[in-house]
Amino acid sequence: MRLGFFLRESMRAVRRNAAPSFAALATVLVTMLVLGVFIPIVQATNGAANSVRSRVLVDVYMKTGATSKDATRVRSELLAVPHVRSVEFVSKDQAYAEQSKRDPQAYALLASNPLPDTFHVIPDNPANVLAVHKSLTPPTASGVAGTIDPSIQSVSNKKNDTKKILEVTNLVTITAAVLTVLLILASILLIANTIRLSLYARRREVEVMKLVGATDWFIRWPFVIEGTIVGAVGALWRSGCWE
Amino acid sequence: MDRDQATRQRARPRQPVAPSAKAKRPSQPAQTAQPVIEFRGVSKHYSAGDVGLDQATFSIGREEFVFLVGATGSGKSTVMRLLIKEIEPSEGSIRVAGHELEQINRKKVPFYRRNIGVVFQDFKLLPNRTVYDNVAYALQVTGGTRREIRAKVPDILRLTGLSTKLHNYPDQLSGGEQQRVSIARAFVNHPPLLLADEPTGNLDPETSIDIMRLLYRINRTGTTVLVATHDQAMVDKMRRRVLELSRGRIVRDEATGLYARDESTREFAQRLRAPTTRPPGI
């Protein structure tokens, strides 16, 4: 009985307030559409930025004569360096196979394998890559960058590239985040104001209901149901727009 | 009138002026009966330093018909708004049917209001509902069943002479008809107390008489009626108890000469239509 009454009341409200209901519906629809288009864009941008950043790593090249014992030792030394998440070993044979597959003619000319054993050092956070690089190349007395192990030949030096990648991806991520926050704030404000306006238009009605002794929830339920109906219609319409 | 006299009158509000008149009204409730409305030293100050009501003390007994008169801004509406607990008094206490209004918390206010019918100058009907639905709403609020509504609403609309207008919307009715709808809505629950704030303020004299007659008829079913008005001529003709407010103070509380006379609504209407004993507008 009660539920039926509230349903009838809200259907009456939807019918009798068709124009304001439509306005509210259109507002919600457009706002949601904009959010719905924008949020995937932000996610794609962030995904791209992150995949670029995940490619940021430090390569450590071993000396040509390094044994597998050396490799094991260096691996544990690298893992002990702060901010290192993982270490990936690529033996010279693996590297040769990979490279020769990419450029078979060039590698066919080579008699022997010129590639060294390599460690890909992956930092726990792309932002820490420079710190990792720094601790892998402690300065020696002569001022030249040294190594942390005698069997290490050299450490890749892509400082400038790394820096640029980090800066650009940071900028993209921050811009996207700020835009998202602004857009969500705007949506909330827009929808809240629409609701407030439609309530304001009916404040006299609410006042009269209170005068004849309607409880707060007796007044609210039809509004809530009306809002749900309008929202559901808006959602259906939106998914219609999507196709 | 001095304060003492006012106090005495308050203690025995239904004391008729002429002792013989009392005998003519056997339905008069016992003098000891609990008053329906009791104001004790009630003041209301609005934020801007305006005084809405200043130490008002009076009481109204059961089945009384009382006029609240006074110029605009004298505090009539303040009394009404205090009674429906739309505003709270700054000091003093108000009792309605024995309930201290101060002790009714916010959640209980709707239930309290169901015991009071209210009628306003601007009718306050729901514009998107028919006459029938407007009256039915007051019953739906109290959880009335559909059967109850179907039984009661046509009855009350017949009483108020609106049987032919059931399915009209308020904007299709005249002012007098709208006011009758609002009285029907106020009375459909048969509340013990009916408040009317300037019920004839927007109506022509002939329609006003109809409305007053309707209120009188409701009063005769045992409902206490309090009418705020500035229609002096109407008040003089009605000869009911008059409370006069001036700048928030009760300056007159008088049971007019023929106050206690028991008359039928027809006699009553005839008397109202008779030429005024003094020129209107004073």
Image: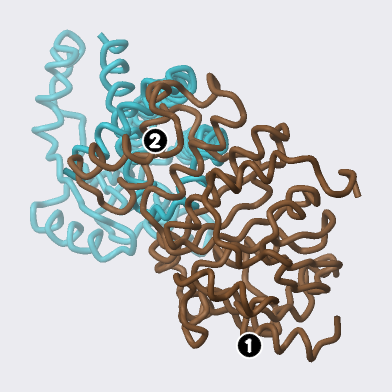
Residue under numbered circle 1: B11
Residue B260 on image: x %, y %: 61, 67
Nearest the viewer among B114 and A223 is B114
Residue under numbered circle 2: B157
Q: In the rendered image, is residue B39 in sight? A: yes
**Can you tell which chain is drawn cyan?**
A
Residue A234 on image: x %, y %: 33, 22
* Left or right: residue A13 compared with residue A110: right
Nearest the viewer among A96 and B227 is B227
In the image, residue B204 above or below residue A105: below
- Dot 1 lies on which element? helix
Question: Which image quadrant: the C terminus of chain A?
Answer: top left
Q: Numbered disc 2: what chain?
A: B
* Left or right: residue B274 compared with residue A15: right
Please give the label number shown on residue A56.
none
Q: Dot 2: few (<14), some (14–19), or many (≥20) neighbours within 10 Å? A: many
Residue B163 on image: x %, y %: 38, 27
Residue B48 on image: x %, y %: 84, 65
**Can you tell which chain is drawn brown?**
B
**Lower position in the chain sequence, tag 1 or tag 2:** 1
Question: Which image quadrant: the N terminus of chain A?
Answer: top left
Q: Numbered disc 1: what chain?
A: B
- Dot 2 lies on which element? helix
Which kind of residue does numbered mark 2 sit on? Leu
